[in-house]
Amino acid sequence: MHRGLPRAAFLFLVLLRACSPLPELLLLFAIPPIPPLLRSSPQMLPATSTPTMPSSAMPIVTSMNTTAATLPRAVAATIPSRTLLQIYRREINLHPIRTKALTTALIASIGDIVAQSLSPTAFSLRRLVGVLTDGLLIAGPFMAFSYDKLETTFPSQHKQGIAKSIAALKMMLVSCFIIDTFFVLEMTTVSYILEGLPLAHLLAHLRADFPTTLRAGTAATLALCPADFLVWRYLPPKARQMGMNMIDLVWTAVISYFAHRNRVCAI
């Protein structure tokens, strides 16, 4: 039995990955958004029922009619929070960066728990907190920025058929083999610092473990490429980071395991 985590907890995490709601996420974001709330229009109300508005209320009505950019936020706030995915869909409209950072940190933490359960060393809370902090403050926001930049560079939203698939393939290749390489280096370095290990040994640690960790990450990336392509091809930009986070549960576990093989966290 692995030290630090009971076998039941490890099996539960494996089942959680096996039952990942990625297909449900694909369906959820394929559904058109709820239409905007009833817009004020003289043609929509009978002349006899038009209420008399005090002049003080006119700025509110004007703002409702003129701030079309804020309608998605107003609509999102009315969506019932019945499931986790519905909560996510609402929050990604209201607070996109914060939501993406939180989901990245949470799923990266689950990946580290899986990695620690496979390690012969004792469970380290400090290591877990380091992975959580990295996902919340660095990896999550940077992933949000880089994915938005990919959509700007290889736009796919208004394309169909082969053209959309080609754009999705380009984004997937850049994400898997350029951005992921940065994330391997960043995660290895930042987690080392946050775990309180001596900075004098950081370069030696990178020389020893980064190549192996990168090879393991590349192998995991190649195995997960079909699922990555589905995310880039079928999910809208605002949902791609969550889709990739679900897939990266396995990838993060692999990176965390190999990055920590030869290190012991400071107490």
Image (spheres, rainbow, N blue to C red):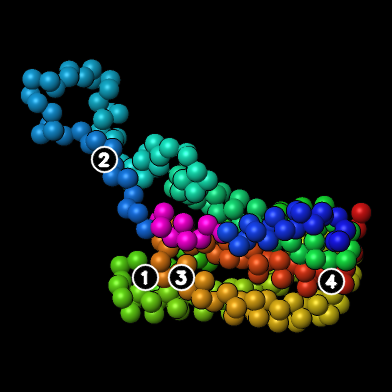
Task: Find residue 178 and name its label.
Answer: none
Task: Find residue 230 and name its label.
Answer: 3
Graded by Cα atoms within 10 Å as few (under 14), some (14 to 19) or many (20 or more), the crowding at tag 3 reads many
Task: Pick whichever of labels 4 and 1 is earlier in the sequence.
Answer: 1
Residue identifier under label 2: 66
Which is more foreground, mark 4 or mark 1? 4
Q: Quadrant of the C terminus?
A: bottom right
Residue identifier under label 1: 156
Tag 4–tag 1 contact (CB < 8 Å): no
Residue 146: tell me if it is visible.
yes
Q: Position of residue 77 (x, y in %)?
A: 42, 38
Residue 142: tell me if it is visible.
no
Residue 33 is left or right of residue 214, and the answer is: left
Task: Pick whichever of labels 3 and 1 is earlier in the sequence.
Answer: 1
What residue span does the magenta drawing correspond to? 20-29
- Amino acid on which the number 3 mark rests in the picture: Leu
Which is more foreground, mark 2 or mark 4? 4
Q: CA distance from mark 3 to mark 2?
A: 37 Å
- Amino acid on which the number 4 mark rests in the picture: Arg
Secondary structure of the residue carrying numbered label 4: loop
Q: What secondary structure characterizes most of the magenta part?
A: helix
Residue identifier under label 4: 261
The tally of labels here is 4
Q: Position of residue 122 (x, y in %)?
A: 89, 59
Q: Quadrant of residue 135?
A: bottom right
Q: CA distance from mark 3 to mark 1?
A: 13 Å
Task: Pick whichever of labels 3 and 2 is earlier in the sequence.
Answer: 2
